[in-house]
Image: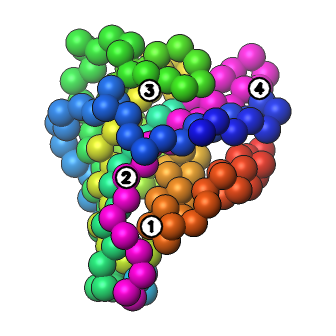
Amino acid sequence: MIIRDGPRWASVALDELSAAYAASSVLREFVDVPAAGSGGRRVRAVVEILKQGGGLAPRALLGGEFVPANDDGLIIEVTVLTDLTASVPSCRSQLWRPLMAGLPPEFAQSVIDGIVRRPLPSGRLVVDRAGHDPVESSPLAFELAAELLSAVLAGLAQSEEIEEIVRQDIIRWS
């Protein structure tokens, strides 16, 4: 699914195997959220964003798997790729040219920040898919992508229609 609102674009897919990478390290965070209760199912999704403006085109691709739990708290694990020397644009993009697979360390905290701003219910989220552009990606792009990923996974876990969720999210980007 691709959604466009003027210069703001987003795509959502169930997975993108070309965005998988071997992690060099994992950034972990715990967020205190109420127990999810009995609702919700295990889900995986990948989101990609592109926000054009002023000659810039910040972009990011993120994906992961969310497993709801009845415990209090959300465990977030973000896999990071520290060795980017061998990277070539091999990650498929739905919105523009191919990306480089992996999440560089300079964007990892932005991913955590985006998820924390829009936390999922209790459970475990593992972000293990990413694509970046060495010129066009930015911390803000990854923060927005993480926020969107969190909203999409929450919707999918509850079997909600996610098109309107995505549309409302990208309209809020300024």
What residue is disc 1 on? 157
Q: Which residues are magenta?
A: 37-59
- In 3D space, how far apart are the residues under numbered discs 4 and 2 (Cα atoms)? 30 Å
Report the disc number at residue 132: 3
Cβ atoms at labels 3 and 2 below 8 Å apart: no
The residue that appears at 50% across and 23% down in the rendered structure is 93
Q: Is residue 85 at all visible to an observer of this figure?
A: yes
Q: What's the amino acid at mark 4?
A: Gly
The relative height of residue 134 versus residue 23 in the rendered view (above or below) is above
Q: Position of residue 22 (x, y in %)?
A: 18, 33
Q: Is residue 54 magenta?
A: yes
Q: What's the amino acid at mark 1?
A: Ala
Ranked by sequence position, the earlier of labels 1 and 4 is: 4
Report the disc number at residue 44: 2
Q: Is residue 35 at all visible to an observer of this figure?
A: no
Q: Position of residue 70 (x, y in %)?
A: 31, 85
Q: Secondary structure at mark 2?
A: strand
